[in-house]
């Protein structure tokens, strides 16, 4: 069958990203032709400033070289500006007469610099700042001329001014607003920026309105005259007073436009065969100029071009994280503040740091940071996710670290780190390696960095730092979304929340059904999505959905922990950490019989037998005659206890029995991630209840329950949840919370991260304030657990067992070839 | 070519694997969702992880130790990782899985 023809007009970042996404989804659906007005392949427009400043070369900012187009069989028409779209005959026509027919057309013509409608705006030496040609002209002019005037005090203008200054010109920035970058900064930050730039030798005139550009006899600009009559010399005038969507072609072809080509949530224009993405498109009234939203559009548009047809683009909340001439700036949301908002500010003009946070009804709604933007990403997350910040208000200004962090992120300043400093302690990856990979491979997301460098791919504690390095390297183009908005993996465009919802609402009970219903684009998923789907199915439809062992990672399939040499570790269950002489004897006998190289006491009050061969596992279980300790699962692990009132002279409650009862109640519970509990019998807290998913502390008058603690990668103290009187209540409240976590958390999200995402208030509302709901949650967990048996016992009695555990000795049976 | 009769196809789980004790170490035999079988040395080119214990999808297996992805057809690690594991000829005839230890295609 002949392929469909896809033509793309424009060869910039948004358009080419759309093609990349499309090729990932369906490499063979289209015969693709790309028209580019410039003589270059796709390059990173954001990095034109470093090129102008002499920090990078043109070669370094190319994102897709010519080989990429060739390898993907894309016909590339460089230097050919399209002048007409003929929608009747479905073809486009370029300036030189080249024609191309299309079945689908993608318009990605970007934007044009806004040229002020003033006399003299066509003189020689007057340019916008948009592409490589402009940059080249600025570089050559700087060699021969002296006076540069930049009109516009926004990001682009300031970067142009800085670059020209570094190339030796005398630069004046003219700005119509009262302060610089008024769309991204408040007046205080704008003034700070101006002072800093003045110290570097730039001159500023503001507020100032340009009236006319005056030319010399050869038709070249020689001066600028302002509305107030002042005249200053100028050999080069750079117009950086904003951009306008380039929708001229579409308009001429009769496609409805209004400050950009109008597109719906699928990036389709009025003509169903024609799509538009990027700066030329107007979606719900907004033409985006930042890269992150454009990349989101690219993904959605590709989904529809690939005829999958389910993705929606619903607009983007944008933040600005910029580096203007080495100064870090960040702003997001309503950073100016308005009626009904409160602001918290920190100002250190000498140190060059200014921070302003805008709060409305206990929710962070805006932030403006100058000089130190390390916490920008964290503030942005608070803004987007509408977290109630009343409880952390005192610390809010000091950032995420002030909320308690004993772990690894001490050096939170990605920028100031030297290149040879280690970022990822698990895989030994240094900052320089990461930066190099980002630049060489054109990486935009933490996932891509993980794949290429291995940084943050093991324990993940450095993911925040990697994210900062990414942002510092590629600026606003960095794709830094929270997990709640990211697709589960490359097999789908849906995020975890959408997948859970579909499974619940459409009663999906098997992995093949779920993949078919949600249009998975791989036949059997991957090692990321299959375990997640399996958990979502069995936790949503207990008793109905069948567990799929082949979709579990090895530890849960073998019911033991794989070790680096391929052997396994076996941890039998000891309820509440209590054992007996006969259990200990059996453990000792097993260790002897199977020549187990190491026997170790664990942090969760268990005994670990390390170095067991896989084929011995079933016999080890049989001889131990103890239930599985689930030390290998995303499941209930252990309930750690202290001695409690039975023996301890300080104990106020029988913590040991409480722990044993909880552990029996929760036995066999699968969960999004591992779950650990502890019960202490008095506030001395010998069982370390403060760093457990559910931590219980007995006091004279009852029990205190803490949730969301974590002793791992990043130590997190649990939050006080509730105080109850009886052991029955401990059971009901704890189990209700755990069931809420099981129903709402994303796969591989620990309770602490779940709690940070949904907020403690949300959990309190569901479990504490609503008795009916609490009881229902409790019952649902009990129902779910009623299907669980001891997996070791089950495995030992299964005839299917040898498929998983037996090795086949080669028999010399020869047959005819 | 000498073919060794290993087991019935049904003795390998769909999207599962079996280990054959070979003369030069373990060999992993994989079964995909459309009943194709592949055989590789049971050693990940990265740190020697037992590939037989990995999760299988499409024509790939993810190593259980560090999640390297190995192509079952070629034995090559998926980019950006670089490495390769030896592969063996294997086929299914009359419901039996047959393996040949000759002509193992060795990595460069």
Image (cartoon, rainbow, N blue to C red):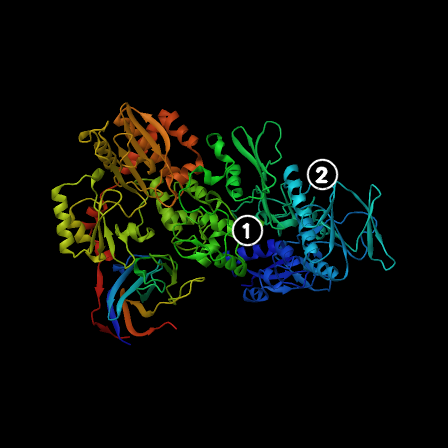
Above or below residue A363? Residue A290 is below
In 3D space, how far apart are the residues under numbered discs 1 and 2 (Cα atoms)? 28 Å
Query: Contact, CB < 8 Å: mark 1 with mark 2?
Result: no
Above or below residue B34? Residue A717 is above
Please give the chain letter of the residue carrying mark 1: A
Alpha-carbon neighbours of circle 2 within 10 Å: few (<14), some, or many (≥20)?
Answer: some
Residue A234 numbered tag:
none
Q: Secondary structure at mark 2?
A: loop
Q: In the image, is A318 to the left or to the right of A711?
A: right
Quarter of the view holding residue A699:
top left
In the rendered image, the quadrant that contains the C terminus of chain A is bottom left
Q: In the image, is A584 to the left or to the right of A688?
A: left
Alpha-carbon neighbours of circle 1 within 10 Å: few (<14), some, or many (≥20)?
Answer: some
Q: Which residue is painted at 75% across and 60% down in the image?
A: A141
Residue A546: percent from left, percent from top: 31, 45
Which mark sits nearer the N-terminus, 1 or 2? Answer: 2
Residue A226: percent from left, percent from top: 81, 44
Q: Examine the rendering and report whether any part of residue A26 can be seen.
A: no
Q: In the image, is B38 to the left or to the right of A627?
A: right
In the image, A431 versus A202, the foreground residue is A202
Query: Which residue is label 1 attached to?
Result: A472
Residue A178 numbered tag:
2
Quarter of the view holding residue B16:
bottom left
Above or below residue B2? Residue A455 is above
Q: Which residue is painted at 22% across and 68% down in the image?
A: A810
């Amino acid at each position: 069958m002949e392929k469909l023809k896809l033509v793309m007009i424009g060869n910039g970042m948004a358009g080419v990203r759309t093609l990349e996404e499309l090729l990932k989804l369906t490499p063979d659906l289209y015969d693709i032709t790309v028209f580019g007005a410039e003589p270059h392949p796709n390059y990173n427009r954001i990095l034109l400033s470093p090129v102008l400043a002499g920090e990078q070369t043109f070669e370094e900012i190319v994102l897709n070289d010519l080989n990429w187009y060739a390898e993907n069989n894309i016909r590339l028409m460089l230097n050919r500006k399209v002048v007409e779209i003929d929608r009747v005959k479905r073809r486009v026509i370029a300036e030189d007469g080249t024609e191309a027919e299309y079945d689908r057309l993608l318009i990605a013509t970007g934007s044009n610099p806004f040229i002020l409608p003033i006399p003299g705006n066509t003189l020689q030496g007057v340019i916008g700042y948009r592409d490589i040609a402009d940059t080249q002209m600025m570089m050559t002019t700087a060699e021969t001329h002296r006076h540069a005037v930049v009109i516009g005090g926004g990001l682009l203008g300031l970067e142009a001014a800085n670059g020209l200054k570094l190339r030796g010109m005398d630069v004046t920035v003219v700005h119509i607003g009262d302060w610089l970058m008024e769309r991204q900064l408040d007046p205080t930050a704008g003034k700070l920026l101006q002072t800093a730039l003045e110290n570097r030798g730039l001159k500023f005139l503001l507020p100032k309105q340009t009236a006319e550009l005056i030319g010399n006899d050869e038709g070249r600009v020689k001066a600028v005259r302002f509305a107030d009559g002042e005249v200053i010399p100028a050999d080069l005038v750079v117009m950086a007073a904003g951009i306008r969507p380039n929708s001229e072609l579409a308009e001429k072809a009769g496609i409805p436009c209004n400050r950009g080509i109008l597109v719906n949530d699928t990036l389709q224009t009025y003509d169903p065969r024609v799509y538009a993405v990027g700066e030329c498109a107007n979606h719900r009234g907004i033409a985006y100029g930042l890269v992150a939203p454009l990349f989101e559009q690219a993904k959605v548009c590709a989904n529809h071009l690939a005829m999958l047809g389910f993705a929606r683009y619903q607009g983007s909340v944008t933040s600005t994280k910029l580096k203007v001439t080495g100064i870090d700036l960040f702003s997001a949301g309503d950073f100016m503040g308005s009626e009904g908002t409160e602001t918290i500010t920190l100002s250190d003009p000498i140190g060059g740091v200014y921070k302003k946070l805008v709060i409305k009804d206990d929710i962070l709604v805006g932030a403006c940071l100058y000089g130190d933007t390390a916490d920008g990403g964290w503030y942005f997350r608070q803004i987007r996710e509408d977290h109630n910040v009343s409880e952390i208000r005192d610390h809010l200004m000091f950032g995420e670290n002030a909320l308690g962090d004993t772990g690894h992120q001490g050096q939170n300043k990605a920028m100031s780190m030297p290149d040879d400093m280690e970022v990822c302690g698990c895989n030994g990856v240094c900052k320089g390696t990461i930066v190099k990979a980002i630049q060489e491979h054109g990486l935009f997301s933490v996932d891509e960095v993980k794949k290429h460098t291995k940084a943050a791919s093991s324990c993940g504690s450095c993911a925040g730092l990697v994210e900062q390095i990414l942002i510092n390297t590629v600026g606003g183009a960095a794709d830094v979304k929270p997990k709640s908005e990211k697709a589960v993996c490359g097999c789908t465009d849906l995020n975890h929340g959408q997948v859970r919802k579909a499974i619940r609402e459409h009663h999906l009970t098997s992995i093949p059904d779920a993949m078919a219903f949600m249009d998975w684009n791989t036949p059997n998923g991957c090692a990321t999505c299959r375990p997640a789907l399996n958990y979502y199915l069995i936790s949503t439809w207990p008793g109905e959905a069948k567990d799929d062992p082949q979709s579990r990672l090895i530890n849960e399939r073998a019911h033991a922990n794989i070790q680096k040499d391929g052997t396994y570790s076996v941890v039998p269950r000891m309820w509440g950490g209590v054992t007996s002489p006969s259990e200990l004897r059996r453990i000792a006998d097993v260790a002897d019989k199977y020549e187990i190289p190491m026997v170790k006491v664990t942090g969760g009050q268990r005994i670990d037998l390390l170095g067991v061969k896989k084929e011995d596992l079933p016999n080890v279980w049989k001889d131990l005659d103890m239930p599985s300790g689930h030390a290998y699962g995303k499941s209930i692990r252990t309930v750690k206890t202290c001695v409690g009132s039975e023996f301890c002279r300080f104990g106020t409650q029988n913590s040991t029995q409480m722990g044993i009862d909880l552990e029996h109640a929760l036995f066999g519970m699968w969960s999004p991630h591992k779950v650990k509990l502890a019960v202490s019998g008095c506030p001395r807290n010998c069982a370390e209840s403060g760093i457990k998913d559910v931590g219980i502390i007995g006091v004279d008058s009852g029990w205190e329950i803490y949730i969301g603690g974590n002793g791992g990668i990043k130590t997190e103290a649990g939050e006080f949840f509730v105080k109850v009187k009886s052991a029955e209540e401990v059971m009901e409240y704890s189990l209700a919370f755990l069931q809420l976590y099981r129903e709402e958390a994303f796969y591989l999200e620990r309770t602490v991260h779940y709690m940070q995402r949904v907020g403690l208030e949300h959990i309190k509302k569901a479990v504490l304030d609503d008795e009916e709901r609490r009881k229902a949650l409790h019952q649902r967990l009990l129902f779910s657990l009623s299907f669980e048996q001891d997996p070791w016992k089950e495995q030992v009695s299964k005839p299917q067992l040898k498929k998983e555990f037996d090795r086949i000795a080669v028999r010399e049976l020869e047959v005819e070839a | 070519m000498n073919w060794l009769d290993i087991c019935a196809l049904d003795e390998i789980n769909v999207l599962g694997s079996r280990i054959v004790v070979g003369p030069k170490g373990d060999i992993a035999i994989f079964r995909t969702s459309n009943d194709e079988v592949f055989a590789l040395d049971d050693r990940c080119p990265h740190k020697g992880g037992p590939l037989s214990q990995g999760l299988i999808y499409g024509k790939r297996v993810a190593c259980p130790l560090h999640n390297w992805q190995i192509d079952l057809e070629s034995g090559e690690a998926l980019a950006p990782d670089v490495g390769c594991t030896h592969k063996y000829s294997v086929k299914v005839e009359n419901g039996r899985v047959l393996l040949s230890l000759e002509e193992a295609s060795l990595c460069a």
